[in-house]
Amino acid sequence: MNPAFSIWRKECRSYLRSPIAWCIFAGFTAVTGVLFTAALRNAEGSAEYLPAVLCTQIILALCIPVSFFTMSLFSTEKATGTIETLMTAPVTDSQVVLGKFAAAYTLVCISIAIAFSIFPFYLKLAAPPPSFSNPSLYAGIAAVALCSAAWCALGTLISLLSHHQAPAAIATLVVTLASAAAFTDNIPGFNDAGFVKALDIADFARGTADTRIVFAAVSTLIFLLFVAIRILESRRWSSIK
């Protein structure tokens, strides 16, 4: 069996057996619902495409599951000293990083799926039910999943650099929330300046796609995972010396 898959399965099982993880699922869904409801109420019937509104609120709330599911990937191993045992196991550094990242990303995707599952209930409560494009909704889901992958890679790197869960969670929370607010048109004037002009992740859910977002997310994902692997390699060599 592939070691990365074993690490992924072990991490996922550990989290899914924890009541706190299910509280995070529920809390994330609740926060998304509150934000979505508030956005619709403030719009007073003049809201943009509903999928775009929902995607914006989910992206803003993503800092919750991303920070929680990545904070202990490596920080707990370092705090308890088990990372040294992991370094001596017959597994490569890339397999360790990718396995732990995949586990966190899987759990974040579960959170996203649960949050999106409430969308039909909002449609039933609306009078009359608003019309929207299913392809736009699916494009919005894909955009959210892509951004969450980049943020999970960031959380993985921060966890590797931290010795405790709390600092890792706070740092990931701050960075993900700030970037989400910046690139969802929630910081006035930010999207009107320079290279980020009119750059909004929720545009995918409005029926338009900005390739800059895809390029930035994929590049960031690859770069952060590469850095994390190199840092773990340097730790392995320093422990050997």
Image (cartoon, helix red, strand yellow):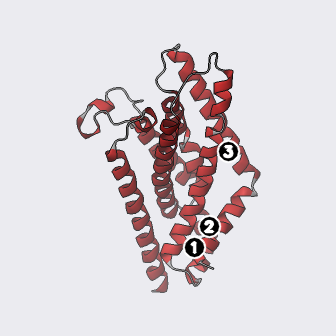
Check the picture and name the quadrant holding the N terminus. bottom right
Per the image, label 2 sits on a secondary structure element best described as: helix
Q: Are marks 3 and 1 in contact (CB under 8 Å)?
A: no
Q: Earlier in the sequence, mark 2 or mark 3?
A: 2
Going by the numbered disc 1, the residue's amino acid type is Ala
- The answer to whether residue 95 is above or below residue 11 is below
**Percent position of residue 19, x then y:** 76, 50
**Percent position of residue 237, x then y:** 44, 82
* Viewer-proximal residue among 230 and 7: 7
The residue lying at 76 percent from left, 58 percent from top is 17
- The answer to whether residue 37 is above or below residue 235 is above
**Percent position of residue 76, x then y:** 62, 63
Going by the numbered disc 2, the residue's amino acid type is Trp
Please give the label number shown on residue 4. 1
Can the viewer see residue 71?
A: no
**Percent position of residue 31, x then y:** 62, 33
Q: Are marks 2 and 3 in contact (CB under 8 Å)?
A: no
The residue beneath circle 3 is: 25
Q: Quadrant of residue 122?
A: top right
Going by the numbered disc 3, the residue's amino acid type is Phe
The residue lying at 56 percent from left, 49 percent from top is 67
Per the image, label 1 sits on a secondary structure element best described as: helix
The residue beneath circle 2 is: 8
* Viewer-proximal residue among 157 and 217: 217
Q: Are marks 2 and 1 in contact (CB under 8 Å)?
A: yes
